[in-house]
């Protein structure tokens, strides 16, 4: 945590459509409270810099400008807000083996050079990140020539993205 960031884990018992009060509590005093409707999913991809995904290349190294992914390789990104998993874990628990599964489908696409056209990306795995707190997800996908560069990539949850679209993100791809 930093003075400009608060990390929190929502309880699994929250139901879509329910209203929840969210407050910051500091030294026992609640402040900055707001009411928010609970969504079935609200995906967010973790980033290491504005719009740059926290991604691992196929060899487990951090994806960066000096260490880009190769076309045809598998990259892992990490996200939160992909919805419920089955079996439902205890709040705050660490995900172990066997891995639970997402209850909502996950897909990805990138914008093409022809603006307005989304090109699907092959998702090899989307589900709970092993040995992370329940709620952190890992998405492994195959890098093709459309990923990276100037074109934003998005993560979608639900059939045809019905439950939400993530923040736009980029990964570095060798040209």
Image: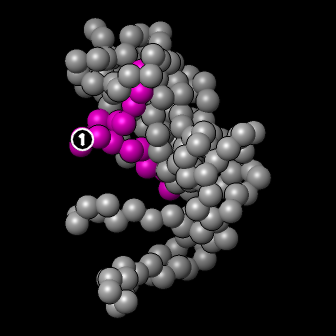
Residue visible at 55% across and 46% down? 132
Tell me which corner region of the image, top left, top right, bottom left or bottom right, holds residue 117.
top left
- Quadrant containing the C terminus in the rendered view: top left
Residue visible at 67% across and 44% down? 96
Q: Position of residue 97 (x, y in %)?
A: 72, 39
Of 2 and 102, which appears nearest the observer?
2
Q: Which residues are magenta?
A: 42-57
- Quadrant containing the N terminus in the rendered view: bottom left
Residue labelled with disc 1: 49
Coloring applied to the structure: one colour
Q: Position of residue 89 (x, y in %)?
A: 70, 58
User: In the displayed structure, would residue 7 be above or below residue 175?
Assistant: below
Residue visible at 69% across and 51% down? 85
Residue visible at 56% across and 22% down? 122
User: In the displayed structure, would residue 112 be above or below residue 93?
Assistant: above
Asked whether residue 160 appears in the rendered view, the answer is: no
Tell me which corner region of the image, top left, top right, bottom left or bottom right, holds residue 27.
bottom left
Of 92 and 168, which appears nearest the observer?
92
* In this picture, residue 41 sits left or right of residue 69: right
Q: Position of residue 129 (x, y in %)?
A: 57, 40
């Amino acid at each position: 945590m930093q003075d400009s960031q608060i990390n929190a884990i929502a309880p699994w018992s929250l139901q879509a459509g329910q209203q929840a009060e969210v407050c910051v509590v500091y030294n026992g005093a609640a402040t900055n409270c707001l009411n928010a409707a609970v969504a079935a999913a609200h995906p967010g991809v973790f980033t290491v810099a504005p719009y740059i995904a926290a991604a691992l290349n196929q060899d487990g190294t951090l994806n960066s400008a000096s260490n880009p992914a190769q076309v045809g390789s598998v990259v892992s990104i990490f996200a939160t807000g992909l919805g419920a998993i089955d079996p439902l874990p205890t709040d705050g628990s660490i995900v172990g083996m066997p891995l639970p599964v997402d209850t909502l489908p996950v897909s990805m696409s990138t914008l093409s050079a022809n603006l307005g056209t989304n090109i699907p990306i092959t998702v090899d795995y989307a589900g709970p990140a092993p040995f992370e707190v329940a709620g952190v997800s890992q998405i492994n996908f195959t890098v093709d020539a459309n990923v990276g560069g100037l074109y934003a990539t998005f993560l979608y949850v639900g059939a045809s993205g019905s439950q939400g679209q993530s923040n736009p993100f980029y990964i570095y791809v060798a040209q």
